[in-house]
Amino acid sequence: MMRFLLLILIYSFFLVSTSLFSNENTKDPIIYNYTARTFFRIPMLSTSIENKEKTYRLDYSPNVELQIGFGGSLYDFGGSLSFNISMEKEQRIKYGKTDYFDFQVYYINKHFGIDFYLQTYKGFYLEEDNSEDILIRDDIELAKISANFFYSFNEKFSLKAGIDQSRKQKTSEMSWFLLSGLEVFALYSPNNIIPEKHNNNGELYYLGGSFFSLFVAPGIGYITNNDGWFFTGIFFLGLGAQYRNNYFKEKVKDYGISFKLNLKMSSGYNGKRFYTGIFIALDGNNSILDKIDVGANSFNVELFWAYRF
């Protein structure tokens, strides 16, 4: 909770300071092709397991730290690098330690974009509803690789303005989108991932699996800019063809379908050179197996302050 309150305070400072000191004409076209930015963010990669009877759902979450980072873009290409800010000792004792790595690069043109994500996490905790007990599982590992291509069918909807704010949207627009790509995630533990009270006296034994998906997801988006104040929202929902290897009491190889959900939202103030705001990204993949459903979900909240030159 304290981390989110700190993010809100930092965001308020960035937003007010940028809007006060950016006295340039926001109607002028932006022709700058280089940007530099600093940001605070909370990344997260979690996994969920639900039985077919829907009697329980296990949400394994990482104990992540607030990060500070630096990034930038050169023409249509961009990337970033971030570092952890130290965590309170009490929080690490209560929820355990998570070792994790997040990497992203992207290419964004006016109407289409490509992004690549690599995430590896080790160490999770389980906090179930109606229970004060916290189960720490430092033996669980989760990795996710995602390559996405997305396209806007409205020529007046600028992805460069909507996603990384390197351009400015002149009119409010709505657009249909198409998202397609490749996603791989792997869940592993040397011990049964299903807690003892849910595994039917050892009958449900699951050590994890690997999942390979090709997906297509239609979407819809909206963007607006009013005297520098902007908002963008893009939502995708679709299906994927999936090949998977799962390790129950025996190894099971099969094919199936997966559900894909992707959400991108940003809001803030966009001046001629300075701009600041909040960016939220959610990416979920849920796989339907014979005995359980397994999901891998990425969530990222980022507060940024940037400059064009």
Image (cartoon, rainbow, N blue to C red):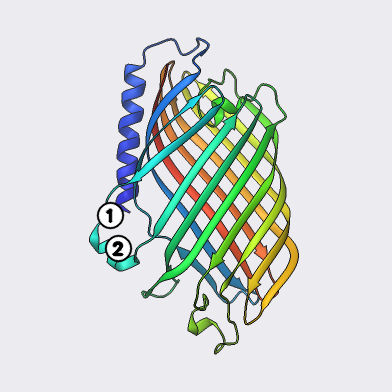
Q: Amino acid at mark 2?
A: Arg
SS label for mark 2? helix
Q: Which residue is rendered at x = 74% and y = 68% of the image?
A: 254
Residue 148 appears at what percent x and percent y?
Answer: 64, 42
Give above or below for 278 relative to 299: above
- Give the number of the disc on residue 50: none
Total residue callouts: 2
- Residue 282 spot, x, y in % from top left: 54, 48
- Residue visible at 40% across and 75% down in the picture: 131
Question: In the figure, residue 144 lies in which quadrant?
Answer: bottom right
Q: Residue at x 69, y 55 (%)?
A: 213
Assess whether mark 1 and mark 2 are in contact (beta carbons under 8 angstroms). yes
Q: Amino acid at mark 1?
A: Met
Q: Residue furthest left?
A: 89
User: In whole angstroms, how far apart are the C-alphas of marks 2 and 1?
Assistant: 7 Å
Mark 2 and mark 1 lie on one chain; the one further toward the N terminus is 1
Which quarter of the image is occupied by the N terminus? bottom left
Left or right side of 128 for 29? right
Q: Residues within 10 Å of mark 1 (few under 14, many from 20)?
A: some
**Residue positioned 32% across, 49% down in the render:** 3
Are there few (<14), some (14-19), or many (20+) residues within 10 Å of tag 2?
some
Q: Mark 1 highlights which residue?
A: 87
Quarter in which the C terminus is drawn: top left
Q: Percent from the top left, x then y, of residue 252?
A: 69, 74
Give the image location of residue 64, x and y in percent. Answer: 38, 55
Q: Is residue 33 above or below residue 12?
A: above
Quick one: SS at disc 1?
loop
Q: Which mark is residue 92?
A: 2
